[in-house]
Structures are given as structure tokens and as C-alpha cells.
Amino acid sequence: SLKALIWDVDGTLADTERDGHRVAFNAAFAEAGLDWHWSVERYAGLLAVTGGKERIRYFLKQDGPTFEPSEDMDAFVAGLHARKTARFAAMLEQGHIPLRPGVSRLLHEARESGVRLAIATTTSPANVEGLLRANLGESAIGWFKVIGAGDVVPDKKPAPDIYHHVLEGLDLAPEECLAIEDSGHGLAAAHGAGIGTVVTVNEYTADEDFTGALAVLDHLGEAGRPCQVLRGEGPE
Ligand code: XBP
Ligand code: MG
């Protein structure tokens, strides 16, 4: 029977990308005196790479300006990303990033029925705590037995590493868990770890390949706002 729900963060707990992370990246670029600007459309392509530091490098390699930082590239990217994370934290604190429909409802139902909670995300740990604190209060961080986030594993999604890390922390088998994700990368990671996965989509991920998902929904639904099954593939 279901022992734990494992939650993705970006795009799943909240729509954090278009008006959150993307805006924070652009603010950090401007603050650093760089004339880089990631439009909503440009960012859609950059989401092909998970991890903010990896995404900056991908942008530079792809068609970014031929850029030779004064310091070594790792230090430059890490510094820029830290400034972006600080900007994103401020946006969270200001309450600009609400939870998606049905998330709070399902978290409370899981707690009431003794289903354990965990997080498996590519984003930085500080962002997870900030999002939970802003929307559910400080104590919500303690609802999650494991928060697997960011650089805690060598390979980010679509690699299954973060889900293996969380299963170890939960001391549960994949069959005892259910993952909730929003993207093809996230599904691949959870599926790769043998965990049944429900996908809820958003504007950036609606057209991605969700083969193997237990179901694809528009959101998790709440009173007065039923969810729609978009693609109901059965379990493989
Ligand atoms: C989504 C990501 C993250 C965020 C940005 O993570 O790939 O990199 O876009 O956050 P998930 P950082 O869907 O697995 O939650 O800049 O902190 O990486
Ligand atoms: Mg996601």
C-alpha cells in the first residue's frame, strides 16, 4: 500500500519558473552588469537543462556571448547563481509564488492518513524551504521526512539519483511510493528509480512526452476546481 508521496518542486508544488526563477536569473544578470536576458520563450528551451548552474553554462555554450570571466568559470557561475538564489528567496518571502491547486489539500490529507512525505528536486534546498515557509509556515518543512534537493547528488534529473537518495532516506521500496512530477525530465528520473508517477502539467511542460506516467493531469484538483485527466496512460 502507499507509504509515501514524493514531490517534485518546480512546476509541481508551485509554478516557479516563468515568473520566479526566470525573473531572478534576469535580475542577477543585470546586477552583475551582464546584458543577458532570458525571455519567456528563450527560457522554455533552457529548461531542457536542469539545475540553475548547469543552465547558465548551457546558455553560454549554446549561443551565449563568447564570455571569458575574469575569474575561473566555476567560481563565476557559482557566484552568479548565488545572486540569483538570493533574488528568488526575496520573491518567495514577498509571497509572490503560491502553491498550485490541490497541493495543500493533498499534503494535509497525506498527513491525516499517515502517508509519509518527501521532496525530490533539482532546485536548491534554500528554495524548497523558502517556498514551504512562505506558503505553509515554518513547521511545514518538518512535514517532509526527506528533502532531496540540488547538488546533494552528482547527476540531476533526468538521472534517477535524487529519487534513489530519497528512497534511501525513507527506507522504502519504490513500489511503496508515488511520485508527483511536472516534466519529462522529472518523470524519467522517478520512472528510472522504479517509482509510479503522476504528472501535473504547466505551460512549459504540457506538450512533453509522458510515456509511462500513471496519469497526466492539469492539476491536483480541489473543492470547486476538479482536475482533468489529460492523458490517462495506464501503468506500464
Ligand atoms: C527544476 C530545475 C531547477 C530550477 C531552478 O527543478 O531544473 O534548476 O529550474 O532552480 P525541479 P535552481 O523541477 O526538479 O524541482 O536555480 O536552484 O537550480
Ligand atoms: Mg519540476
Image: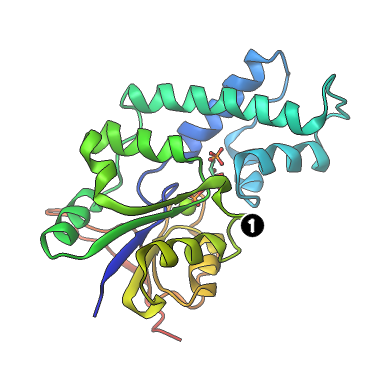
- 105 to the left or right of 206: left
Residue 225 in sight here = no
Q: Which residue is mark 1?
A: 155
Q: Position of residue 61 (x, y in %)?
A: 82, 41
For the image, the number of numbered tags is: 1
Residue type (three-letter) at the residue carrying disc 1: Asp
- 220 to the left or right of 179: left
Q: Position of residue 224 (x, y in %)?
A: 12, 53
Q: Quadrant of the N terminus?
A: bottom left
> Residue at image x 25%, y 75%?
2
> Residue at image x 50%, y 70%?
210
> Residue at image x 54%, y 63%?
184
Q: Position of residue 75 (x, y in %)?
A: 74, 28
Q: Is mark 1 within 8 Å of ligand 1?
A: no
Q: Position of residue 159 (x, y in %)?
A: 61, 64
- What is the basis of the colouring in this image? rainbow
In the image, residue 158 above or below residue 82: below
- 114 to the left or right of 220: left
Residue 166 in sight here = yes
Q: Quarter of the image holding residue 220?
A: bottom left
Q: Residues within 10 Å of mark 1 (few under 14, many from 20)?
A: some
- 28 to the left or right of 87: right
> Residue at image x 48%, y 68%?
190
Q: Nearer the viewer, residue 45 or 52?
A: 52
The secondary element bearing badge 1 is classed as: loop
- Name the outermost residue toward the bottom: 236
